[in-house]
Image: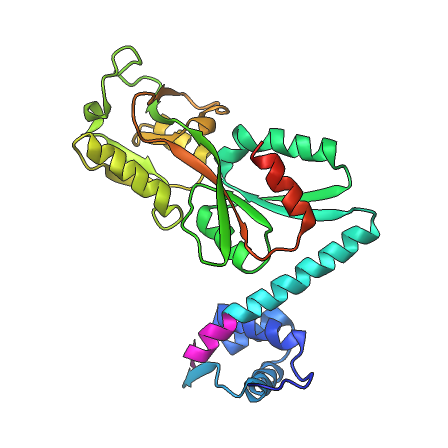
């Protein structure tokens, strides 16, 4: 057990994290506005405090050790918790009775989330909320680091420290260029598009949703030829408009676009997409508990 004896300082964690991003003492020192020798001394001091080498040094090359990789996660958590606590204090001084940092995927803002936020603001005007758009993966990372209180995402594949709840389910829609020969009246099944190029959300950013689209195409007898990927709905629509492929998106994402595309709702497909609320299981944020009640009603 390490006895820190008040030796560990916030700056040690900040310096350490910047160095993990650059893996270069000169670049990290420049970003931190300190000398390279001062940074080296502080990192060495940190390693003495935690009694572990956090970096491997090979000539001019720097890489994280196993202990360093583990420490990086904890350092992010500590700084995230501190930032969250200071935000809560600051907002309490302004007269707010709570704060909720809400992450969301773009499609959630098109239909589901705005009404819930309005309801929160009307019923609990002294609860402040902060919104941040991000992919499933980004939201999960921010939740782990306590930089979000809740995420609205299209995945329930979360760690054991998280709870989740399905808050919305909707149909998928096929996205076609406006001049595509297949019309809504002539649509029979996805088999008609087995030779098309597809533009999808990246697998690494939204694995559950990506695999759902793959399963949908597979159930129609083909594997999609994926030529482009994007996490942003407007980008996907612009690529489709430009004739670079077709796509499949949640119905809610189709509600606001000026691109020259058309949509065919896949009403007869058993595959639906769900929106999940995800949050840290051990939260003590009372304002979050209020918001969770609003989400499911």
- Tally of numbered discs: 0
**Residue at 69% in and 46% down:** 287
**Residue at 33% in and 25% down:** 174
99 displayed left or right of 268: right
Q: How is the image coloured?
A: rainbow
**Residue at 80% in and 52% down:** 92
- Locate the N terminus by quadrant: bottom right
In this view, the residue in front, 78 or 179, is 78
Query: How far across and down, in percent of the image, does residue 211 sit?
Result: 30, 42
Q: Quadrant of residue 214?
A: top left
- Locate the C terminus by quadrant: top right
251 lies above or below 166: above
18 displayed left or right of 218: right
Residue, far left = 221
Query: How far across and down, in percent of the image, does residue 105 sit?
Result: 50, 40
**Residue at 33% in and 42% down:** 210
Query: How far across and down, in percent of the image, does residue 25 sit?
Result: 52, 78
Boundaries of the magenta span: 61-72
Q: Quadrant of residue 262?
A: top left
- In this view of the protein, can residue 130 be seen by the observer? no
Is residue 275 magenta-colored?
no
101 lies above or below 66: above
36 lies above or below 121: below
Is residue 63 magenta-colored?
yes
Q: Quadrant of residue 4?
A: bottom right
In this view, the residue in front, 74 or 21, is 74
In this view, the residue in front, 165 or 112, is 165
Query: How far across and down, in percent of the image, does residue 27 sit?
Result: 53, 72
- In this view of the protein, can residue 193 be seen by the observer? yes
49 lies above or below 272: below
In this view, the residue in front, 47 or 237, is 47
């Amino acid at each position: 057990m390490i006895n820190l004896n008040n030796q560990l300082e916030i700056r040690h964690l900040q310096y350490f994290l910047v160095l993990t991003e650059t893996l270069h003492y000169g670049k990290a020192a420049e970003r931190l506005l300190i000398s390279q020798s001062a940074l080296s001394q502080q990192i060495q001091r940190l390693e003495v405090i935690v009694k572990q080498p956090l970096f491997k040094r090979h000539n001019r090359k720097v890489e994280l050790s196993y202990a360093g990789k583990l420490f990086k996660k904890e350092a992010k958590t500590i700084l995230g918790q501190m930032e969250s606590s200071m935000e809560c204090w600051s907002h309490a001084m302004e007269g707010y009775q709570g704060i909720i940092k809400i992450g969301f995927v773009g499609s959630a803002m098109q239909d589901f989330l705005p009404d819930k936020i309005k309801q929160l603001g009307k019923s609990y005007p002294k609860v402040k909320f902060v919104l941040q758009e991000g992919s499933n993966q980004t939201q999960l990372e921010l939740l782990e680091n306590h930089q979000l209180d809740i995420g609205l995402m299209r995945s329930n594949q979360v760690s054991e420290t998280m709870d989740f709840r399905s808050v919305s389910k909707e149909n998928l829609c096929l996205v076609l260029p406006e001049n595509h020969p297949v019309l809504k009246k002539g649509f029979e099944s996805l088999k008609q598009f087995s030779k098309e190029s597809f533009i999808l959300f990246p697998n690494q950013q939204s694995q559950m949703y990506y695999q759902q689209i793959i399963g949908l195409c597979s159930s129609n007898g083909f594997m999609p030829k994926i030529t482009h990927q994007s996490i942003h709905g407007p980008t996907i629509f612009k690529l489709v408009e430009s004739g670079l492929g077709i796509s499949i998106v949640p119905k809610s994402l189709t509600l606001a676009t000026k691109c020259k595309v058309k949509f065919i709702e896949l009403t007869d497909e058993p595959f639906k997409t769900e929106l999940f609320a995800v949050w840290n299981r051990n939260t003590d944020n009372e304002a979050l508990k209020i918001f969770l009640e609003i989400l499911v009603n």
